[in-house]
Amino acid sequence: MPKEHLDTEMASQAHDVSYLTAIHWQDNQPRVRVQTDETPSTEIVETQDLHLRFRINDDIPRRCVGRIERSTEGSVYVDCESPPTTGRRCERCQIVDNIAAANMHQAHRKGRDAIDQRMAAYLEHPHRLYVAIFRDGSTKIGTTRGTSGGQRLVEQGAWFAKYVGHVEDGFLVRELEDLVSESLNLGQAVDTRKKISGHLRAKDDNELQKILEGVTLEVRKVLKAQNVEGYSLLNETWSNPAIDDPLWQDLVAYPATLTHGAHEFTIRSMVGRLAACTRTGMTEVFLLDLQPLLGRPLERGDFELDELALQVSLF
C-alpha cells in the first residue's frame, strides 16, 4: 500500500482500517509491513517521511502480526490474517514463534539433531559475535548471522558496536556468547525502556566509545583464554547510521499513549523500532516506540485528534 493511503488524503474515508504488523530493516533503511482489509493484502512501506493520522478503535478486532520462519536461505516473514488470542499473535503463530525461539537460543544445548531441521540449516552458517552499546551506556553481548553488514545491530537500535569474533556456525557462536555472558556478567539483551531513556538523556558519544572499548577488552581476554576450534578474533567497529542525524540530538518523549485515542505524526528517522517524529504545527521532535501499534486497527477518518500536553522540564 503506497504511503498516501496512510496520510491525511484518506481522512474523509471513515472506517478505512490498516494494520502495521512488523518493522523491517533492509540496507540500513526502515520499513513497515502494512495490511489492509480491502481484499486482504500486505505491502512494505518505507518509513522515511511516512505520515500517519489514525485513531485506535477498540470495536475493530486486532490482527495477528504473523511470524518469522528460518531456513538455510535466511529468514522469511509469514503474514497472518487471524485475530490474536494472546499478545500480538494467534495461537498457531505464537506456538511456531515459541518453538523457533527455543530452538534458536537453546540449539547449542539441545544439539543439532534435537531441533527442527530448518532451524538447524539456518544455524549451520557463519555467524559473528559482537559487543554493543546503547545511548544510556547499557552494553550487551550478541550474535548475528552472516559475515558482513549490521542488520542485527540496526534492528536492535545499538549506537556503537564491536565485532569480536567470526564463528563457524550458530551453534558454536551461542556457546561463546553464553561463556562471555557468564564470565563477565554481561547481558544478552537491553530493555527498550533503557534505549528510550538513552535517546532522551544520551551519554556523550566519546564516553560511550570508551565504555565499549573497555568492555570489548574484557571480552577479548575471555575469548583468548579458550582453546576452541571454529572461530577467529575480529576487531571491526560499527556505528548506527543515525549517529550524525541532528534529529536524534534533542528529542522529546511523545506525551500520549499510542494504544488508544487519535494521533497524527510524520516519521522522520528511526533507530531500531524507535521513531523520531514531527507533528503538524509543533516544533518538537518526538520519540515514539512503534511496537505498541503492531496489530492494532488504525482507523483513518475525519475525527478530532488528541491534544498533546507537553511537560516543561525543571532541569
Image (tube, rainbow, N blue to C red):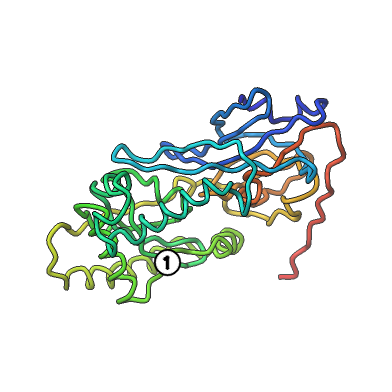
Give the residue displayed 41% in from the left and 69% down from the top. Answer: 187
Q: Which quadrant does the C terminus fall into?
A: bottom right
Q: Which residue occupies the foreground of this view, 105 or 161?
A: 105
Q: Which residue occupies the foreground of this view, 161 or 95?
A: 95
User: Which image quadrant for residue 309?
Assistant: bottom right
**Secondary structure at numbered mark 1:** strand
Give the residue displayed 49% in from the left and 43% down from the top. Answer: 67
Task: Give the residue furthest to the right.
Answer: 304
Q: Does residue 223 sit above or below 302 in this rendering?
A: below
Q: Which residue occupies the foreground of this view, 277 or 183?
A: 183
Q: Does residue 59 sit above or below 35 in this rendering?
A: below
Percent coordinates x, y for residue 311 in the rendering? 78, 61
Q: Which residue in the structure is indicated by mark 1?
A: 139
Percent coordinates x, y for residue 233 in the rendering? 19, 59
Percent coordinates x, y for residue 178 in the rendering? 31, 68
Percent coordinates x, y for residue 210 in the rendering? 38, 67
Three-letter residue code for mark 1: Thr
- The number of numbered badges drawn on the structure is 1
Q: Which quadrant does the N terminus fall into?
A: top right
Near mark 1 (Cα within 10 A), the count class, few <14, some 14-19 or many ≥20, is many
Give the residue displayed 28% in from the left and 69% down from the top. Answer: 219
Horizontally, is 75 left or right of 60 in the view?
Answer: left
Give the residue displayed 48% in from the left and 64% down from the top. Answer: 190
